[in-house]
Image (tube, rainbow, N blue to C red):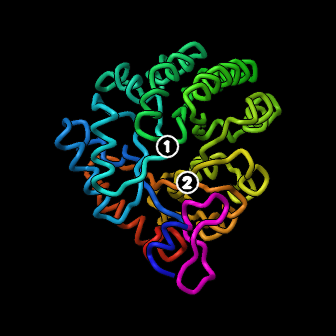
Amino acid sequence: MSSAALAGAALVPGTGALAADEKTRRYPLGIQFFTFNALAIQGWTKFSEAMGIARNLGYEEIQFAGLMGNSPELVRKRADELGLRLRTLHIGNDQVRAFWAPGGSIVDAQDAVYTPTGIVQVARVNVPIARDLGCKWAVVAGSGARNMQSLAAVKQMCAALNQAHEIAAQAGIGLSYHGHRPEFSVLEGENVFDVMLRETHPAIRFELDVAWVAAAGADPVALIERHAARIVSFHLKDWTAQGKAATAGDGSIDFKAIHRAAAKIDDPIFNVECEGGQNVDLTEQARRAIDYLRPLGWTMKV
């Protein structure tokens, strides 16, 4: 199969492309741009440079965590020059940065932004940006802690997500939600994710961070198989036996099984996410992640 045929097959919903041996379905692989946050926050030149680094590593698309003041037109032009796809945008990150004081808590900043009223406002501000980037999905990037304190709070958040969905639909794109550990935990005797599925509009989709699913003690493969119709995208990072997030391949998550289960999803989107503390070279982690995932069926280049 030629590279052109591979690329074309990847754009057909529900099909994906096959490797040369016609046995392994292949998916384009993107990266969550927060991986390059330290570089990207330094202004457009460094932001653009980070996009080039992602492409040179072999990533085929980018999911931005906000645009850090750069215009969607400029970012889209640069993505087109590099041959990078932009299908999803995390929304709310730029607003969280405005509340996240040096030395402060990101959870406090998220709580300030992702109130029920705030979620609707985040959609009003950011859905047009996602549309102008050419994205198919605006992804609400989180919830903070307060929305997860009770089932009543979860349901209030879901009502806000439904309003945000209406805003996205009017712009011609879809709304998705990125979960963390609490969304896959049990609260007041109910699984929070089940409640969210029930309380949100059926057109709303979810982005599974497989590490956070594992962190909550849930099985990401079983979750995919059970709820494939409501899942549109993934963050691919690992989870260790010591309870730490890690680069794909450095923990205990079965990515091969995740790849198989994802065949149930219509045109799934995958983005690597690399996290690390002080003195961690996230560019090298991004390189190691793609090297690990490529033989398992990710990236269109075998």
Residue 279 numbered mark, or none: none
**Circle 2 is placed at which residue position?**
269
Where residue 258 appears, as percent x and y from the top left, is: 64, 63
Would residue 25 be counted in the magenta stretch?
A: yes
Q: Residue at x 45, y 41 (%)?
A: 134
**Circle 1 is placed at which residue position?**
88
Q: Quadrant of residue 139?
A: top right
Q: Residue at x 60, y 16 (%)?
A: 116
Give the Cα distance between marks 2 and 1.
8 Å
Q: Of marks 2 and 1, which one's residue comes earlier in the chain?
A: 1
Image-based side of 99 in relation to 120, left or right: left
**Amino acid identity at mark 2:** Ile
- From this viewpoint, which residue is outermost toward the top? 117
For the C terminus, give its image quadrant: bottom left
- From this viewpoint, which residue is outermost toward the bottom? 21
- From this viewpoint, which residue is outermost toward the left? 45
Which secondary structure type mostly characterizes the magenta part of the structure? loop
Q: Which of 220/48 is in front?
A: 48
226 to 20, vertically: above or below: above
296 to 134, vertically: above or below: below
Task: Give the magenta-colored segment's residue range.
Answer: 9-26
Q: Are marks 2 and 1 in contact (CB under 8 Å)?
A: yes
Q: Residue at x 54, y 79 (%)?
A: 19
Would residue 298 be counted in the magenta stretch?
A: no
Image-based side of 123 in relation to 190, left or right: left
Counting other residues with Cα less than 10 Å from the Cα at mark 2, is it few (<14), some (14-19), or many (20 or more)? many
Q: Secondary structure at mark 1?
A: strand
**Amino acid identity at mark 1:** Thr
Q: Quadrant of residue 239?
A: bottom right
Where residue 7 appears, as percent x and y from the top left, is: 48, 67
Image-based side of 155 in relation to 238, left or right: right
